Image (tube, rainbow, N blue to C red):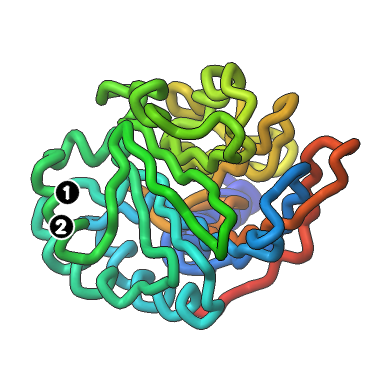
């Protein structure tokens, strides 16, 4: 082989090693803070300015997840959100990660609490183990259930469904005995569940995760692989008729600790009271780096 081809091969090999190093060592811990506002017609006046911190796909049990977790908790608490929502896949892999993460997650605090739902990886680890960990960490888990949010005389509903892929999601049970005139924020791990949520006009916002934003997203090509029920809506803000949807890229990676062009994310969503004549409107205020 000529020296010219040897140099080319060496260059390609070096670039490959550098890219893999970036994908494993840099981007998975390069947190992004996304700050958005959502205008909602008929939002109860007392909830104007209400802020939700949205986390997803923590994947406790993966080494990178535990290294990032203290920084994530610090950033969220520093923002003083009204509510913290964790949209599934708290865990993955070994159950030992639950004990390690529980003490850090217990530091999360918000006036209206920390609430979560199950994801498909939580079923692989074991639902009972994940539910017990969440309870000890002070996280209220909504499994086809709802919680009433109150501000003065105004109310909203926070609802959550069981994992769609492996669990037994039942939206009517989650909304059972809720007043039809109250706006509902729905937590559903798989974002394509929005097609079901559309049948309920009082669900104004769905928060989801599951996709990791694609996790590996080469420029111009987009996500190489997307999971089931994450093909239609896979990252960011969407308007699906009357329903606003936000799909978090998540903070973890699952077993493969790689990310490319798809950084881990913490989203802060502020609700604003919109004009009755207008539909829901998303506005991305900014996205900035968070040092991990």
The image shows a total of numbered marks equal to 2
Q: Are marks 2 and 1 in contact (CB under 8 Å)?
A: yes
In front here: 25 or 282?
282
Residue 6 appearing in the image: no
Residue 131 seen: yes
Name which residue lies at 42% across and 59% down.
24
Q: Nearer the viewer, residue 101 or 36?
A: 36
Residue 12, position as x, y percentages in the image: 58, 51
User: Viewed as shown, does residue 118 lie left or right of 213?
Assistant: left
Which residue matches tag 2?
133
Please identify the quarter of the rendering in which residue 46 is found: bottom right
Residue 29, relative to residue 178: is it above or below? below
Residue at x 43% of width, y 22% of height: 228
Residue 230 percent location from the top left of the image:
51, 28
179 over 32 or under it: above or below: above
Mark 2: secondary structure = helix
- Label 1: which residue? 130
Q: Residue furthest right?
A: 277
The quadrant where residue 221 appears: top right
Q: Residue at x 40, y 53 (%)?
A: 86
Q: Is residue 181 left or right of residue 95?
A: right
Residue 279, how many percent across, how many down? 82, 36
Q: In the image, what residue occupies the spot 77% across and 40% down?
A: 280
Q: How dense is the environment of label 2, judged by Cα within 10 Å: few (below 14), some, or many (20 and up)? A: many
Q: At which x and y percent is residue 82?
A: 52, 67
Q: Which mark is residue 245?
A: none
* Callout 1 secondary element: helix
Closest to the observer, 197 or 18: 197
Q: Is 6 left or right of 45, judged from the image as shown?
A: left
C-alpha separation, residue under disc 2 versus residue under disc 1: 5 Å
């Amino acid at each position: 082989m000529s020296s010219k081809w040897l140099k080319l091969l060496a260059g390609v090999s070096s670039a490959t090693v550098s890219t893999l190093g970036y994908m494993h060592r840099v981007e998975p811990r390069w947190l992004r803070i996304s700050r958005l506002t959502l205008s909602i017609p008929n939002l109860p006046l007392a909830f104007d300015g209400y802020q939700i911190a949205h986390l997803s796909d923590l994947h406790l049990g993966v080494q990178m997840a535990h290294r990032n977790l203290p920084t994530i908790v610090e950033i969220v608490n520093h923002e003083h959100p009204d509510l913290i929502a964790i949209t599934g896949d708290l865990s993955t892999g070994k159950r030992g990660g639950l004990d390690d993460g529980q003490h850090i997650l217990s530091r999360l605090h918000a006036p209206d609490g920390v609430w979560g739902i199950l994801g498909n990886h939580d079923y692989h680890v074991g639902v009972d183990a994940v539910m017990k960990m969440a309870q000890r960490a002070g996280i209220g888990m909504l499994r086809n259930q709802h919680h009433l949010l109150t501000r003065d005389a105004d109310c909203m509903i926070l609802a959550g469904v069981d994992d769609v892929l492996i669990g037994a999601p039942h939206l009517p049970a989650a909304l059972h005995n809720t007043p039809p005139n109250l706006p509902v924020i729905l937590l559903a791990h798989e974002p394509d569940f929005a097609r079901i949520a559309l049948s309920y006009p009082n669900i104004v916002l769905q928060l989801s995760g599951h996709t990791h934003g694609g996790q590996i997203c080469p420029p111009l090509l987009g996500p190489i692989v997307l999971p089931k029920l994450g093909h239609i809506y896979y990252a960011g803000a969407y308007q699906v008729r009357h329903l606003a949807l936000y799909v978090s890229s998540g903070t973890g990676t699952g077993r493969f600790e790689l990310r490319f062009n798809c950084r881990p994310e913490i989203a802060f969503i502020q609700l604003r009271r919109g004009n009755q004549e207008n539909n829901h409107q998303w506005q991305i205020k900014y996205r900035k780096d968070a040092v991990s």
